[in-house]
Image (cartoon, rainbow, N blue to C red):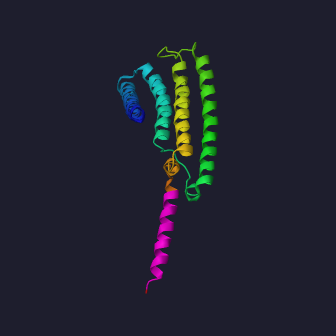
């Protein structure tokens, strides 16, 4: 069962990265071609800007999924890393509960907007605006699953909490760690004759 789950996670991650790369490439190509056409030929592709907007929305939401999955969201973990296991677990559970509430709000709001947008067609492409708003629903649902799995690991899998809290640190936090390490090194060197 674990093999199947790991393979599913691996291939879905690859598919997500390919989808993001294709959308970003197409968005850049469409916008570049449209700029060239407008600048040199005084005409453009009316659908390219709109399609690029749709792709940008999808890239943003799918990128948030990838960042959560890879634990690349910014987080201030300097204090939490130094706490004992139980307070660290409590902080982790509270922060994830807050995230789940926000994801619920995004999910409900995206469903409402998708329902409203079904009869509203985009002007240039002519597809329902629902296809833009449904990205938020999909993002919230997948992120909910990722967070539920992470909470399960934190509570029931021994020694997994530290790896789950290891978020991407900000540059300021990294500089602070460098200063602390330099101070320790300087203090240690003064003791030597």
Whether 87 is drawn above or below 181: the answer is above
Whether 144 is drawn above or below 169: the answer is above
Left or right, 105 with respect to 25, comes to: right
Left or right, 2 with respect to 89, comes to: left
Whether 51 is drawn above or below 85: the answer is above
Q: Position of residue 35 (x, y in %)?
A: 39, 28
Q: Please say whether residue 150 is one of the residues in the magenta stretch.
A: no
Q: Residue at x 50, y 29 (%)?
A: 57
Q: Position of residue 8 (x, y in %)?
A: 40, 31
Left or right, 3 with respect to 171, comes to: left
Assign the magenta stretch its main secondary structure: helix
Front-most of 1 and 190?
Answer: 1
**Count of marks placed on residues:** 0
Q: Position of residue 178 (x, y in %)?
A: 47, 64
Q: Is residue 129 visible?
A: no
Front-most of 143 and 8?
Answer: 8
Q: Position of residue 83 (x, y in %)?
A: 59, 58
Q: Please say whether residue 183 is one of the residues in the magenta stretch.
A: yes
Among the 4 quarters of the image, the one containing residue 118: top right
Extent of the magenta region: 173-192
Q: Residue at x 52, y 23 (%)?
A: 132
Q: Is residue 97 visible?
A: yes
Q: Residue at x 49, y 58 (%)?
A: 174
Front-most of 163 and 186?
Answer: 163
């Amino acid at each position: 069962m674990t093999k199947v789950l790991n393979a599913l996670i691996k291939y879905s991650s690859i598919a997500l990265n390919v989808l993001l790369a294709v959308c970003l490439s197409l968005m850049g190509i469409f916008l570049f071609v449209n700029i060239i056409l407008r600048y040199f030929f005084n005409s453009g592709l009316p659908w390219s800007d709109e399609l690029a907007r749709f792709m940008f929305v999808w890239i943003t939401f799918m990128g948030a999924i990838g960042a959560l999955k890879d634990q690349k969201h910014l987080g201030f973990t300097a204090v939490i890393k130094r706490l004992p296991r139980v307070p660290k677990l409590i902080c982790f559970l509270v922060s994830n509960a807050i995230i789940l509430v926000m994801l619920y709000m995004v999910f409900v709001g995206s469903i409402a907007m998708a329902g409203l947008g079904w009869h509203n067609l985009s002007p240039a492409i002519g597809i329902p605006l629902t296809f833009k708003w449904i990205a938020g629903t999909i993002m919230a649902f997948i992120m909910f699953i990722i967070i539920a799995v992470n909470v399960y690991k934190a509570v029931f899998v021994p020694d997994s909490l530290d790896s789950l809290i290891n978020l991407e640190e900000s540059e300021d936090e990294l500089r602070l760690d460098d200063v602390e390490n330099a101070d320790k090194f300087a203090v240690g060197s003064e003791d030597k004759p």
